[in-house]
Image (tube, rainbow, N blue to C red):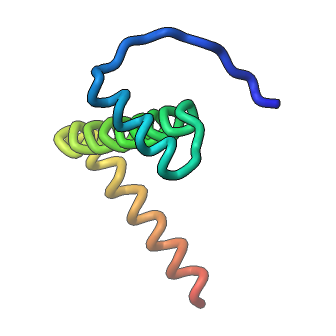
Amino acid sequence: MKDSMVFTTSLSKELLGMIDSYSKKFKVPKNRILEEALKAYFERMKRAEYIHSFKRAAGEEEITNMAEEGLEDYLKILGDETR
């Protein structure tokens, strides 16, 4: 059994109606719908954080130089492996 906790929150009537409707339509518990929706949301947020950090890093010359040096080393390794 997985760990779970109970929490109380308020949602709009519209959202609650949608949750209830899909719960009945797909015969899925409401908490499962909320869990899956939150997981998807946090995954999108994580991707947005990565994108933001890559964009920020792309503007920093030192990071760009390190990435280019790493790529050169990687290409050298690939060249050695094909021989």
Q: Which residue shows up at 26% across the image and 38% down it?
A: 52
What is the tally of numbered marks visible in this picture?
0
Give the percent coordinates (x, y) of residue 51: 29, 44
Above or below, comparing residue 63 to residue 11 in the picture: below
Outermost residue toward the right in this view: 1
Q: Is residue 6 left or right of residue 9?
A: right
Give the percent coordinates (x, y) of residue 16: 37, 27
Outermost residue toward the top in this view: 8
Outermost residue toward the left in this view: 59
* Quarter of the view holding residue 2: top right
Above or below, comparing residue 2 to residue 7 in the picture: below
Q: Quadrant of the C terminus?
A: bottom right
Above or below, comparing residue 53 to residue 70 in the picture: above
> Toward the viewer: 11 or 41?
11
Q: Which residue shows up at 49% across the image and 9% down it?
A: 8
> Toward the viewer: 46 or 8?
8
Give the percent coordinates (x, y) of residue 31: 56, 31
Q: Is residue 81 left or right of residue 3?
A: left
Q: Quadrant of the N terminus?
A: top right
Give the percent coordinates (x, y) of residue 7: 55, 11
Q: Which residue shows up at 54% across the image and 72% down it?
A: 77
Above or below, comparing residue 77 to residue 10 in the picture: below
